[in-house]
C-alpha cells in the first residue's frame, strides 16, 4: 500500500511564546537542549514509513529552512522531504489561516495522486505511529479523521472541542469555545483536536474549494472546514491518540502530547525530560527522534578554581557543554554551554551557546541561545526586584532571556543588535518592554545573537 502524501503546516508564529518566536517560526524553536520542535513530527513520519512530505513555511522561516536543509534528507525513488514556501499562488496575499496554507498548495496534493492526505501541524511535542492512525482512518472509511486527546477542562479553551458517539464518530465540534463541553461522565476533562488530520483527498480538495468561495471564510480548519463537513453529514471520526503505541515503547506507556503553546507549557515540557521515567521516552532505540548532527565533544564536568567540585543533581547536560566547579539543581543545559566556577543554577533551562560567569546565581530562568551572564550576577530569587529589570516573566515566574541577551550584575540588560529591534517592534513583546522601569538597551551593531562572545563572555 502506498503511504499517503504528508503536508506539514510549519508557518505559524507562536505569538504566545513571545520572545522565543519574535525571530523564528514556532516549529524552529529549540527543545530539550538539542532538538527543534519540527524534529518530532518529522521523526514520527519517517519512523512510520512516510516518505513523501511537504513542509509549508511562511513566518520567519530562515532558521527553520537552515535546520531542515542541513538535517532532513531522504534519498530514493519518489522519496522526499521538500520545503514549500508561501508563493501567493491564489492571489496577492500570504497564508490567511491553517486551511489556506493547504489550499494554496493544492497543486502538490493533486499531483501526488494518493487516496488520502495527511495534514499535520509542525509545532507539537509527541511520539506517534502515524500509520496506526491511517489504518484506523481506512478501517472506518472516514472522510476525515481527527487525532484526539483528553485534556483538563481548564486548558481546553485553547483547542477545538470534539464530541463523539459510542462508535467514535464526531457528532459535535467547537473551535476554542470559552465554555468547553466536557466528556460525558468526566466533568473535568474535554476531548480536543490535536490539529492532525487524515482526509480522503477528494474530500479535502472539494472542501477547500468551497471554503475559498465563501466570502465569510476565515481560512481555518477548525472554524470553517470541519464545521461545514459536519453540517453536511460527512463521515468524521476521532482517532483516540491514547491507543497509539510506537515501536519499542512498553504496552503500558502513557500517551504523551504537548502543544507547548505558551512559554510556561514549553518550559514545563522541556523540564519534564529530566523525570526519572519521563512520559516522553527519548531513550527508545527503536523510535529515535532525529535532529542535526553536530561535531561537539562529549559534555565534561571539571573541578574549578580552589578545588571546587562540579556538583549536579537531577540535571541533563548536552554535548559540547562544560560545567566547571558549579552547582546545578533540576536544570537542563543545551549543547555548547559553559557554566563556570561558583555558579549556582536551580530549575533553569539554557539553550545552546549560553555562557554563565563565575559566581552567578539564578533560579527559574529560561535562557535562549547565546546568552551571556556576567560574573556575580544574581536573579530569580526576588520577583518584585526582577520585575523591574526583566521584561519577560511568565505567569509561573520563569524569567525568559531572549536570544543573545547579556545580563550584567546590575543595571539594564542588553539585547543583541539583531534581536532588540524585533522585540521592541513585535506586538507580542513590546507591551512587556513598556512595563519595566529599567529599560533594556540594544547592543552595538557588531554584537549579534548568533555569537556567544558578547560582553562578559568567558
Image: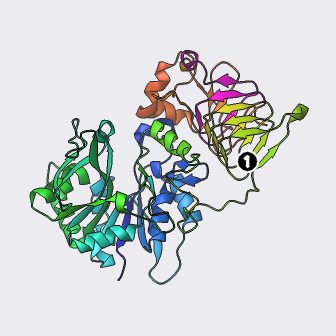
Q: Quadrant of residue 140?
A: bottom left
Magenta stretch, residue numbers: 358-386
Asked whether the viewer can see residue 107, the reply is no
Q: 10 Å neighbourhood of mark 1: few (<14), some, or many (≥20)?
A: many
Residue 246 position (above or below residue 35): below
* Residue 321 located left or right of residue 3: right
Quadrant for the N terminus in the image: bottom left
Q: Which residue is drawn at 45% across and 66% down?
A: 246
Q: Can residue 43 be seen in this view?
A: yes
Task: Tell which of 447 and 26 is nearer to you.
Answer: 26
Q: Residue at x 63, y 25 (%)?
A: 413
Q: What residue is at 15 percent from the left and 59 percent from the top? A: 229
Residue under the image location 28 percent in, 49 percent down? 192
Residue 344 image offset from top left, x and y in percent: 71, 30
Q: Name the residue under label 1.
A: 321
Q: Position of residue 66 (x, y in %)?
A: 56, 58
Please say whether residue 367 is one of the residues in the magenta stretch.
yes
Instruction: Give the percent coordinates (x, y) of residue 199.
Output: 26, 67
Quarter placement of the C terminus:
top right
Amino acid at each position: 500500500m502506498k503511504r499517503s502524501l504528508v503536508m506539514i503546516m510549519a508557518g505559524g508564529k507562536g505569538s504566545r511564546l513571545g520572545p522565543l518566536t519574535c525571530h523564528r517560526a514556532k516549529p524552529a524553536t529549540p527543545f530539550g537542549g538539542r532538538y527543534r520542535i519540527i524534529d518530532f513530527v518529522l521523526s514520527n513520519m519517517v519512523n512510520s514509513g512516510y516518505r513523501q512530505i511537504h513542509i509549508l513555511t511562511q513566518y520567519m522561516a530562515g532558521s527553520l529552512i537552515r535546520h531542515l536543509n542541513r538535517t532532513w534528507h531522504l534519498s530514493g525513488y519518489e522519496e522526499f522531504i521538500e520545503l514549500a514556501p508561501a508563493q501567493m499562488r491564489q492571489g496577492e496575499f500570504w497564508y490567511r489561516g491553517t486551511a489556506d496554507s493547504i489550499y494554496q498548495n493544492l497543486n502538490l496534493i493533486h499531483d501526488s495522486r494518493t487516496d488520502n492526505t495527511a495534514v499535520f501541524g509542525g509545532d507539537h511535542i509527541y511520539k506517534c505511529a502515524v500509520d496506526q492512525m491511517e489504518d484506523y482512518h481506512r478501517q472506518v472509511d472516514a472522510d476525515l479523521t481527527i487525532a484526539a486527546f483528553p485534556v483538563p477542562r481548564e486548558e481546553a479553551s485553547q483547542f477545538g472541542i470534539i464530541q463523539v458517539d459510542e462508535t467514535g464518530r464526531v457528532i459535535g465540534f467547537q473551535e476554542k469555545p470559552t465554555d468547553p463541553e466536557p466528556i460525558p461522565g468526566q466533568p473535568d476533562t474535554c476531548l480536543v483536536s490535536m490539529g492532525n488530520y487524515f482526509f480522503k483527498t477528494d474530500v479535502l480538495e472539494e472542501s477547500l474549494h468551497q471554503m475559498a468561495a465563501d466570502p465569510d471564510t476565515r481560512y481555518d480548519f477548525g472554524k470553517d472546514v470541519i464545521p461545514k463537513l459536519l453540517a453536511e453529514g460527512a463521515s468524521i471520526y476521532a482517532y483516540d491518540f491514547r491507543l497509539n503505541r510506537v515501536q519499542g515503547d512498553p504496552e503500558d506507556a502513557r500517551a504523551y502530547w504537548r502543544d507547548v503553546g505558551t512559554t510556561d507549557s514549553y518550559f514545563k515540557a522541556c523540564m519534564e525530560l529530566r523525570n526519572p521515567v519521563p512520559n516522553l521516552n527519548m531513550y527508545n532505540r527503536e523510535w529515535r527522534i532525529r535532529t542535526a548532527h553536530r561535531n561537539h565533544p562529549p559534555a565534561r564536568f571539571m573541578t574549578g578554581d580552589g578545588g571546587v567540585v562540579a556538583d549536579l543533581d537531577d540535571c541533563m547536560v548536552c554535548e559540547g557543554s562544560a560545567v566547571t566547579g558549579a552547582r546545578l539543581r533540576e536544570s537542563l543545559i543545551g549543547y555548547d554551554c559553559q557554566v563556570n566556577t561558583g555558579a549556582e543554577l536551580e530549575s533553569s533551562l539554557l539553550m545552546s551557546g549560553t555562557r554563565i560567569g563565575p559566581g552567578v546565581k539564578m533560579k527559574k530562568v529560561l535562557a535562549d541561545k547565546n546568552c551571556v551572564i556576567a560574573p556575580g550576577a544574581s536573579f530569580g530569587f526576588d520577583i518584585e526586584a526582577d520585575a523591574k529589570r526583566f521584561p519577560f516573566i511568565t505567569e509561573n515566574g520563569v524569567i525568559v532571556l531572549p536570544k543573545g541577551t547579556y545580563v550584567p550584575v546590575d543595571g539594564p540588560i542588553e539585547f543583541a543588535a539583531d534581536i532588540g529591534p524585533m522585540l521592541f517592534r513585535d506586538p507580542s513583546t513590546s507591551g512587556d518592554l513598556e512595563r519595566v522601569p529599567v529599560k533594556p538597551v540594544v547592543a552595538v551593531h557588531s554584537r549579534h545573537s548568533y555569537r556567544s562572545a558578547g560582553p562578559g563572555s568567558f
